[in-house]
């Protein structure tokens, strides 16, 4: 074959971000915004990497002795992991594009890692899926985020909606979103390092001692109720739990003025729920609203956010979209 195009979905953490790092539960769902990676056969002694989304380009030797620099090091680490799994490292060109804003809490780096792993292993004739795809792709996330929870990679690889606890197999959640209700994503446009936010929140929790542990325990109870709300289609309860969860994230220092403003506007304009999603300190907020309120709500949010999109949730995971002939 001449090449492969694979894609993987982004994610929303509906409940439990940050708390999941210390072993508590979280709920995540795949979204209709996807990352796509094209891998093509080439000649020579290099792996060529190009990300139009990031505006960066690099190339690395086949022995992987040199890093690609910056965000592209994710792909070098994936190749190193694949080499340990017995895969050959052959000359190829990689073009990475994402429908998601970068560093916005929507899992763009995990989606590109998963899509690249699937595309490259398919090019070699031994495509990785499921847990194997997840294991290798996670090595790339370690480079991107330092101490990733694993949620982003799990959703990108497997899709759907999951109840997640670090170190345990994700449990599927039968999410039921009734007709007449939609989710929106509002991007503040503020970039931040997930690693920095995670480390800061952990320091705050440790500083608070027993009080910090109580916040984590309450967050876990919110997750428990949210699973029931999703499975029963109780959007009123789900929305109130979103507002509540945002308050807990404010308490541990994950939010900022831009995110709080979006959440406050959503509440004032009648949205059922809203909260930051992902690491915080910028990135995105997720809003649950009645379909009839979307246009007014979106217009108001667009005055304070760089991007506002209506999205589908609970979509399929990583998939090969196209096999390119020579």
Image: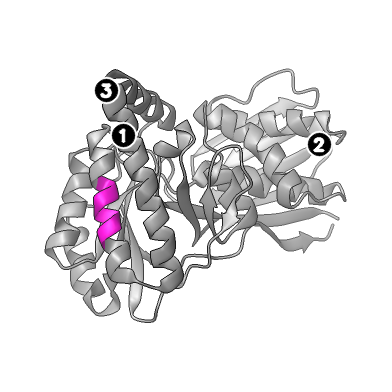
Of residues 48 and 24, the one drawn nearer to the viewer in this rendering: 24
| Residue occupied by mark 1 | 214
Magenta region, main secondary structure: helix
Q: For residue 323, what is the image quadrant?
A: bottom right
Q: Residue at x 75, y 44 (%)?
A: 132
Q: Residue at x 27, y 47 (%)?
A: 246
Q: Indicate whether 295 appears above or below 94.
A: below
The disc, 2 or 1, on the residue closer to the chain's N-terminal end is: 2
- Which segment is the magenta one? 240-246
Q: CA distance from mark 2 to mark 1?
A: 52 Å
| Residue occupied by mark 2 | 91
Q: How far from the left and from the top, in percent, is residue 48?
A: 69, 36
Numbered disc 3: secondary structure: helix
Residues marked 3 and 2 touching at CB (< 8 Å): no
Q: How far from the left and from the top, in percent, is residue 196?
A: 38, 25
Q: Residue at x 28, y 63 (%)?
A: 239
Numbered disc 1: secondary structure: helix
The quarter of the picture where the C terminus appears is bottom right
Residues marked 2 and 1 touching at CB (< 8 Å): no
Residue 208 image label: 3
Pointer 3: residues within 10 angstroms few (<14), some, or many (20+)? some
Q: Nearer the viewer, mark 2 or mark 1?
A: 1
Q: CA distance from mark 3 to mark 1?
A: 10 Å
Of residues 75 and 29, the one drawn nearer to the viewer in this rendering: 29
């Amino acid at each position: 074959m001449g090449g492969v195009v694979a894609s993987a979905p982004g994610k929303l953490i509906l409940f439990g971000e940050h708390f999941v790092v210390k072993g508590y539960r979280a709920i995540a769902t795949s979204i209709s915004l996807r990352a796509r990676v094209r891998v093509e056969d080439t000649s020579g002694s290099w792996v060529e990497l190009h990300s139009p989304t990031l505006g960066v380009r690099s190339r690395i030797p086949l022995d992987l002795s040199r890093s690609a620099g910056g965000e592209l090091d994710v792909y070098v680490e994936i190749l190193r992991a694949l080499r340990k799994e017995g895969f050959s490292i052959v000359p190829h060109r990689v073009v990475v594009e994402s429908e998601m804003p970068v560093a916005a809490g929507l899992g763009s780096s995990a989606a590109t890692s998963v899509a690249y792993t699937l595309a490259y292993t398919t090019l070699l004739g031994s495509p990785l899926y499921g847990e194997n795809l997840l294991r290798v792709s996670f090595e790339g996330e370690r480079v991107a985020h330092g101490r990733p929870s694993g949620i982003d990679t799990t959703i990108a690889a497997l899709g759907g909606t999951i109840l997640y606890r670090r170190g345990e197999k994700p449990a599927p959640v039968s999410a039921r979103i009734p007709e007449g209700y939609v989710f929106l994503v509002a991007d503040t446009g503020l970039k931040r390092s997930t690693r920095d936010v995670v480390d800061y929140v952990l320091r705050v929790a440790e500083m608070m001692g027993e009080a910090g542990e109580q916040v984590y325990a309450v967050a876990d109870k919110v997750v428990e109720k949210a699973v029931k709300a999703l499975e029963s289609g109780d959007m009123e309860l789900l929305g109130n739990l979103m507002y509540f969860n945002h308050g807990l994230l404010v308490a541990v220092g994950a939010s900022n003025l831009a995110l709080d403003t979006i959440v406050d506007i959503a509440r004032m304009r009648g949205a059922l729920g809203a909260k930051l999603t992902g690491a915080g300190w910028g990135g995105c907020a997720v809003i649950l609203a009645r379909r009839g309120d979307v246009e007014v709500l979106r217009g108001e949010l667009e005055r304070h956010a760089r991007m506002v999109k209506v999205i589908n949730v609970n979509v399929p995971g990583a998939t090969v979209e196209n096999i390119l002939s020579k």
